[in-house]
Image (tube, rainbow, N blue to C red):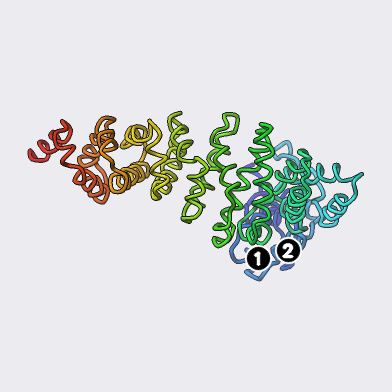
């Protein structure tokens, strides 16, 4: 290839590779379809890379340059002996008319199933297809389909599962989906219903489809609406944490949802009422991977800010012990959350029994270790404050005496 001179007009101005599917923009410049479509999709300012003139973002305005493609194919065929690969004729891109025809097919019972299957197949094939489908309103149609199934109490698993997959595939950015799912609780209520129905019948496939989508939906939902989430919603989120057959990705999605919604005090109370603190401790006892532990501790720190959360935490025999064990073993983020949990426990829920339990299971030892470890100054100060709060009880502890001795030696 290095010895062959490639005609300059065969080369895409973006990728600097021979064009396989040349298309011409409204500015008159020709690019390889894949390169210009990616440019249009990702560019903040939608302009022609060569002329800097404005370009419509939709790929519907790209015109196939058949003459140039045939010239490139002929040139490649002539140079196969020199190591040039042949370029196949590209498939005709999905058109808006084809998509709209399939959407029309969803309205008739006899063509509903086939149309839905075709839409899913097209969405899995390429980003080009997904862009075209999003522009044609497929995501809106799928959200409506899922919401209608919820309102009608229709538990047709196959159609809802396919619709969930399509919405997930078409979720290109938050801004385009927010008007569809983030300005009311309709879609969240529908997904909660999907979770309830399929957690009841142990259909982990549907649960695994719904949860990542629910996480994305919560991220775009207006914060004022999140304060109106029902207890039923939180109950289903906590149920997910108990299910062995649910994927790790789904459990992480549920934890993300609970962390994001627990910022509001009203939601925090409901999450605790649903039994989240107990399930979080049980989940952590299974020694999950690092990023899941960080999510668990993040949520525990939020929930222990309320009295009911601390009460539930202290009712679990392993609560203090499991938090203590993770300090200085996982990450700085986990250390910060763990110390916060000990801080609110020591300040607001420290009965004599709790204070002795902290000493017995090694929490006091860990606080002393934090004081001497390579931690942030604010974290050391927080650990020092906790030790001061109950110094009368802990003063005779060997770890406290060792800490004071090593500190004096310095």
| Position of the C terminus by quadrant | top left
Q: Residue at x 65, y 65 (%)?
A: 48
Which residue is the site of mark 2?
25
Which residue is the site of mark 1?
48
Q: Secondary structure at mark 1?
A: loop
Residue 247 is situated, as x and y percent measured from the top left of the image, at: 58, 33
Q: Are marks 2 and 1 in contact (CB under 8 Å)?
A: yes
Query: Where 142 sits versus 400, above or below?
Result: below
| Position of the N terminus by quadrant | top right
Query: Where 102 sits versus 325, above or below?
Result: below
Residue 64 is situated, as x and y percent measured from the top left of the image, at: 79, 57
**Residue 397: which disc?**
none
Residue 153 is situated, as x and y percent measured from the top left of the image, at: 77, 46
Mark 2: give few (<14), some (14-19) or many (20+) Cα within 10 Å.
Answer: many
Q: Is residue 66 left or right of residue 367?
A: right
Q: Residue 194's image quarter?
A: top right
Residue nearest the viewer, comparing 288 with 321: 321
Q: Residue 183's image quarter?
A: bottom right
| Total numbered labels | 2
Q: Secondary structure at mark 2?
A: loop
**Badge 2 or badge 1: first in the primary sequence:** 2
Residue 35 is situated, as x and y percent measured from the top left of the image, at: 66, 53
Q: Is residue 410 left or right of residue 371?
A: left
- Residue 82 seen by the camera: yes
Q: Residue 326's image quarter?
A: top left
Q: Residue at x 39, y 36 (%)?
A: 315
Q: Residue at x 72, y 61 (%)?
A: 58
| Residue farthest along the left direction in this orientation | 409
Spatial separation of the CA atoms under disc 2 and disc 1: 8 Å
């Amino acid at each position: 290839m290095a010895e062959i001179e490639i005609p300059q007009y065969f080369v895409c101005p973006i990728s600097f590779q021979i064009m396989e599917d040349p298309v011409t923009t409204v500015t008159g410049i020709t690019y390889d379809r894949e390169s210009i479509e990616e440019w249009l999709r990702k560019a903040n300012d939608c302009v022609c890379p060569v002329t800097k003139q404005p370009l419509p973002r939709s790929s519907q305005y790209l015109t196939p340059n058949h003459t140039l493609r045939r010239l490139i194919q002929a040139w490649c065929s002539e140079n196969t002996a020199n190591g040039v690969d042949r370029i196949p004729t590209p498939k005709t891109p999905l058109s808006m008319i084809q998509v709209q025809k399939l959407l029309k097919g969803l309205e008739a019972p006899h063509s509903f199933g086939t149309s839905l299957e075709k839409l899913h197949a097209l969405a899995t094939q390429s980003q080009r297809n997904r862009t075209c489908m999003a522009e044609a309103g497929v995501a809106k149609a799928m959200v409506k389909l899922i919401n209608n199934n919820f309102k009608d109490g229709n538990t047709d698993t196959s159609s809802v599962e396919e619709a969930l997959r399509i919405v997930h595939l078409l979720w290109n950015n938050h801004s385009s989906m927010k008007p569809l799912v983030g300005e009311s609780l309709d879609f969240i209520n529908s997904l909660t219903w999907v979770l309830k129905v399929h957690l009841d019948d142990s259909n982990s496939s549907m649960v695994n489809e719904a949860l990542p989508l629910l996480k994305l939906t919560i991220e775009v939902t207006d914060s004022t609406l999140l304060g109106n989430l029902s207890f039923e919603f939180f109950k289903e989120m906590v149920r997910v944490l108990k299910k062995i057959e649910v994927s790790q990705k789904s459990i992480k999605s549920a934890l993300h949802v609970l962390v994001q919604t627990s910022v509001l005090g009203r939601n925090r109370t409901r999450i605790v009422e649903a039994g989240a603190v107990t399930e979080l401790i049980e989940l952590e006892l299974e020694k999950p991977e690092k990023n899941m532990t960080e999510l668990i501790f993040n949520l525990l720190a939020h929930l222990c800010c309320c009295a009911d959360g601390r009460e539930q935490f202290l009712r679990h025999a392993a609560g203090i012990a499991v938090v203590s064990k993770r300090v200085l073993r996982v990450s700085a983020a986990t250390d910060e959350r763990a110390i916060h949990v000990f801080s609110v426990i020591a300040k607001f829920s420290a009965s004599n029994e709790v204070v002795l339990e902290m000493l017995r299971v090694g929490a006091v030892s860990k606080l002393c270790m934090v004081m001497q470890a390579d931690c942030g100054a604010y974290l050391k100060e927080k650990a020092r404050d906790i030790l001061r709060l109950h110094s009368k009880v802990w003063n005779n502890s060997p770890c406290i005496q060792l800490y004071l001795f090593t500190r004096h030696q310095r």
